[in-house]
Every structure is written in C-alpha cells, then in structure tokens.
Amino acid sequence: MKGHVVGLHLSEKKGTIKTAVGAAEFTALGIAGDAHAGNWHRQVSLLDAEAANRFTEAAGIVVAPGEFAENVLLEGIDLAQAALLDRLIIGPVELEITQIGKECHGAGCTVFQRVGECLMPKQGLFARVITPGIVTVGDKAELIQRTLSVHVVTLSDRCSTGEHEDRSGPRIAEMVTAHFAGTRWHLAVDRTVIPDEPEMLEQILEHDRDEMTDIVITTGGTGIGPRDITPEVVMGLADIEIPGIMEYIRIKYGADKPAALLSRSIAVVMDNTLVYALPGSPRAVEEYMTEILKSLEHTLMMRHGLGH
C-alpha cells in the first residue's frame, strides 16, 4: 500500500499542538526536536489524512495541521489496515508499528474540547524508528504488512500414516483463526503431521526458528509413554521457559481430572518464536487453547519489547 507524506509536525512539549515543518530528522530515539522522542515504543505518531478529513467533515470543524498531535500525516495509505509490527517505509526511514490508538487527553485535547471526541484514540498509530534518516513533506511512503505466522504440528504415529484422523491439529488451527478474526493481524496458519520422531520434530522447530515463525503449537507426545518425546525436544532448543501458563492449566483441569496432571506440556521461547507443546487429545487441546489464547497477543508483544 503506497502513498506520500502531506504533513510533518513537531512540538517541544507533550500535550501541545504540534507545529508544521518541511522536513524532520528521524533518529534512533524518534524525531529530533519532538517531545515524544525517547527510548520507548511511541516515538512517532501517524495519522491518515483521509480519515482526518472524514472526521472533521462529520464534526463540522476545522482542525489545524498538528492539532491531532500527529507527527506524520499520510495520504494514500489506509492506516486502518495496519497491524502491530507492520513496517512503514517513508523516504529513507523505516518505522515499526507499535501501538494502535491511545487514550485521549480529554480536557487537554483541543479537538475533544470542541467535538467531545478525538480521532487519535481510534485512528492514530504509533511507531518506533528502525532505520533513521531525513523525511521531507512529499516523500513517498509504503506500508509493508507483516504476516503473523502460526505453525501447528501434530505428533502421532498413527495420524502420520493415515490410520487415524488428526482432529487436534485442525482444532488448534480453527481456534487460532477464530481468535484473530476481525483483528488487524495478517494471520497465516500452516499445519504439519509427523510421527513421534525426535529428529523430525527438531528439524521442524529449527526451521521455524530460522524462518522467524511467530508461534509454533504442537499437539501430542507430552505424556509419559515410551514414544512421548515432545517436551525433551522442545526444551533442547528453548532459550526461555514460560512455566506459569502450563502449570495453571494443569492445576485448573487436574482438580477434576487427576490424569491431566500427568501431562508434561510446556511453553518456551525459541529465539523470537513462541512454542507451546500441548497434549494430543482434542478435548485437552480445547482446554489448553482456551487459556493460552487469553494471553497470546500480550506474550507476543512482550517478546518484541512492547509488553510493558
């Protein structure tokens, strides 16, 4: 999606209307001379000019450039299509989208004072600088959408030969897809079925790590049987273990079903890939995914430095 810059605005103090400039220096900490520059995730604020025009026309007001407190006003790019972690290329500068919307200053916002609402909480985007440089009004801009990649891996000797139907892997994919439906994320879910072979699982996990797959969810092989090898393989590649979520799930469902406490399900971080190793039964998958999905996006954001 391509467009161009129609406005650049800076302010020396937070909570004040920004002043239009013809060019701005984007540094590793944000825009030089702007109050919001710093070592945090909301270094640069972005606004869609078409959305701003629709808002002001509906409200019947005139809004001065920078009055929405936007650093960059873009035309030709529908920012409502942008998701977290998407990239925005503006001239020589590359930005990463880090937040969608924000809390309005209310009484401290001149637009809110006149209309009773503001555009930035719903339409504004925030970003951090990945590649510094000088941006000039009129520079071309392009939104690069980032795929949120999920790989579901079923481990089952019998499912891998077609002897049994894999019902757990498809259920995980279905629940993930339903969870992200209607959100801005650009989701892609792949599925693989393999036998309970440690070498095959290790190869898949290493490939997903190297390809920077966001989330891997395995099902099967977390029990104490002679072919249950998933936890050992996953832990062998893990950089960080996330014990709390699986401990909670075991306790929650083990209270009524003591056999659930025998599960060795684990959650880990492998480089920047989140890995969840779940039991193999469709019922257990339903229970585990119900809990995992509650914190999945926050966990993903924390790994990218956006969770605090």
Image (tube, rainbow, N blue to C red):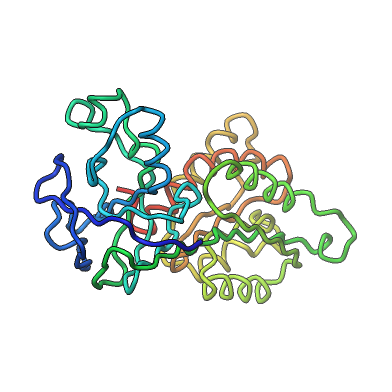
- Label tally: 0
In the image, is 284 to the left or to the right of 264?
right
Name of the residue lying farthest toward the left: 12
Which one is nearer the viewer's eye here, 59 or 180?
A: 59
Q: Position of residue 33 (x, y in %)?
A: 11, 59
Which one is nearer the viewer's eye here, 115 or 83?
A: 115
In the image, is 63 to the left or to the right of 219?
left
Residue at the image point whose x is 52% and y is 76% from the top: 210
Residue at the image point whose x is 73% and y is 44% from the top: 282
Q: Position of residue 306 (x, y in %)?
A: 34, 53
Which one is nearer the viewer's eye here, 162 or 120?
A: 120
- Above-or-below relation of 184 to 225: above
Name of the residue lying farthest toward the right: 163
- Above-or-below relation of 187 to 29: above
- Above-or-below relation of 104 to 173: above
- Above-or-below relation of 161 to 289: below
Q: Position of residue 93 (x, y in %)?
A: 32, 70
Residue at the image point whose x is 41% and y is 29% from the top: 58
Q: Where on the picture, by quarter, is residue 91?
A: bottom left
Q: Position of residue 167 (x, y in %)?
A: 79, 49
In the image, is 12 to the left or to the right of 165?
left
Q: Where on the picture, by quarter, is residue 197?
A: bottom right
